[in-house]
Image: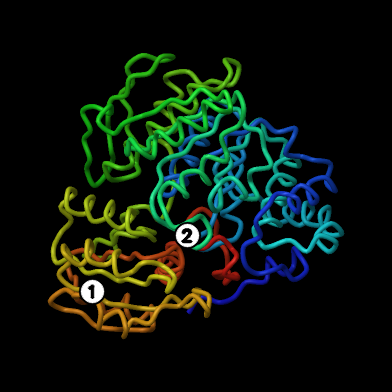
Amino acid sequence: MPLRDDLVTRLFPPLERGVHWGLDVTRGLLAAAGDPHLGIPSIHVGGTNGKGSVAATCASVLAAAGRRVGLYTSPHLCSFRERFQVDGRPVDETVLAAAAAELRSAVEAWRPSFFEATTALAFTAFARERVDIAVIEVGLGGRLDATNVITPLVSAITNVALDHAEYLGPTLADIAREKAGIIKPAVPAVTAEPDDAIRSILEEIARERGAPLCGLHPQEIRDTVASRERTAFTLSTDAWGELRVSTPLLGPHQAVNAAVAALSLERLPSGLRPAADEVVRGVAGVRWPGRLQVERLDATTWVFDVAHNTAGMHALADALRRLDFPRPLVGVVGILGDKDWRAMLPPLFRITDAALLTQPSSAPQERRWDPHAVAAAVPLPPLAEIEMDLEAALERAGEWAGAGTVVVTGSCHTVGDALALLDLVPLASPTSHEALPASAGAV
């Protein structure tokens, strides 16, 4: 079973749980450290789904172009340090410790939430690491998210779907307005939002702020070839002409994410804009674990995907169907209780042959679902069981699948815990999985 790691408690005094709306606390923390975020050029990436993939792809391309790149994302899978990367590697613990020490008195005075503190930590650590540019993923929403203290060179909003409605509002229009809060006056913006009504909201806000908005429609991506190894497509650009791009991130939706990344990079000032060959190399070299991540363990194919809302689960189910993974297809599913699991599970269960409902040990106690209530409310595959112990669920799923495929999904907690249990920890090599509070940005 994954164990608690004490890195966070060694870095900071006890942090507030829950979500803090507003930017004053984050600004106060950063002011105490000399406002490091003001000296770092940045790209800001928001949206409901795909924003991590876009951010990671932007960072990979910039690194291929010879830039020293900071990447701040959330939540993490197995290691807290995954959130803070420089040139594709988690920032060393000694650097995080030095940055936290610089912030400590302000943290004690301002009493920030976990995410506010880690956001300030990211900018302070990136300044210490002397990055040339940082790619910053929005945590929740946009307008009042702690990351929105920056004025980036480019803003990207991947899409808008129903998620975190308790914070962002009950309708897609409400959520769109919150996410559009990262659009800054005169700063270029990019979106792949496919719905005309929602896109019109983004366009209206961009016009009000004098921000040129580039819209991408999925159908504008041509000749997409999706396999179990890569996703390739052709994209038309103004700066580089026709690009034939191939990403190791799987599924047709990843073609859209890679295109958003490319169009965002195209809008950088000429001194920072990568060349065409650097875009192609950077997209081809991106690493973003837990997103249709495929591993082969003995005879069994394993797929790990952090789909944590209805749109994400539809994308996963569509990709599984298109990529024709070996049968039987066995789902190991653990979803947080505050998610709309009634809508999330049917798309997955319509294509799986069997399923195990489970509980990741790192899920916050107050956000855990009740698999027994789920089993009574949702039609299950022909073979289905409840196994509350994730390690036992993984073992049984492997036995059921044999030479077929196990799909581990439902949340970052489920995927992260599973990767740790199967000794597939990504990016870093922590000694244990860090169980963090519900305010840790966990989806």
Question: Which residue carries the number 2 mark?
Answer: 164
Residue at coordinates 49% horizontally, 35% vertically from top-left?
Answer: 156
SS category of the residue bearing label 2: loop
Q: Residue 208, position in %: x, y?
A: 56, 28
Residue at coordinates 72% horizontally, 52% vertically from top-left?
Answer: 121
How many numbered tags mark residues here? 2
Name the amino acid, label 1: Ala
Task: Classify residue 385 as left or right of residue 201.
Answer: left
Residue at coordinates 43% horizontally, 19% vertically from top-left?
Answer: 276
Q: Residue 143, position in %: x, y?
A: 59, 45
Q: In the drawing, what numbered circle is on residue 235?
A: none
Question: Which residue carries the number 1 mark?
Answer: 355
Asked if labels 1 and 2 touch by Cβ distance under 8 angstroms, the answer is: no
Q: Residue 307, position in %: x, y?
A: 36, 58
Task: Classify residue 43 as left or right of residue 7.
Answer: left
Q: Nearer the viewer, residue 172 or 273?
A: 172
Name the amino acid, label 2: His
Residue at coordinates 60% horizontally, 31% vertically from top-left?
Answer: 184
Of marks 2 and 1, the one in the foreground: 2
Whichever of labels 2 and 1 marks the residue nearer the N terminus, that label is 2
Quarter of the image where one finds residue 283:
top left
Q: Is residue 410 above or below residue 126?
A: below
Q: Is residue 322 above or below residue 205?
A: below
Q: Is residue 149 above or below residue 107?
A: above
| Disc 2 to disc 1, C-alpha distance | 26 Å
Q: Residue 76, position in %: x, y?
A: 53, 58
Task: Classify residue 411 as left or right of residue 184.
Answer: left
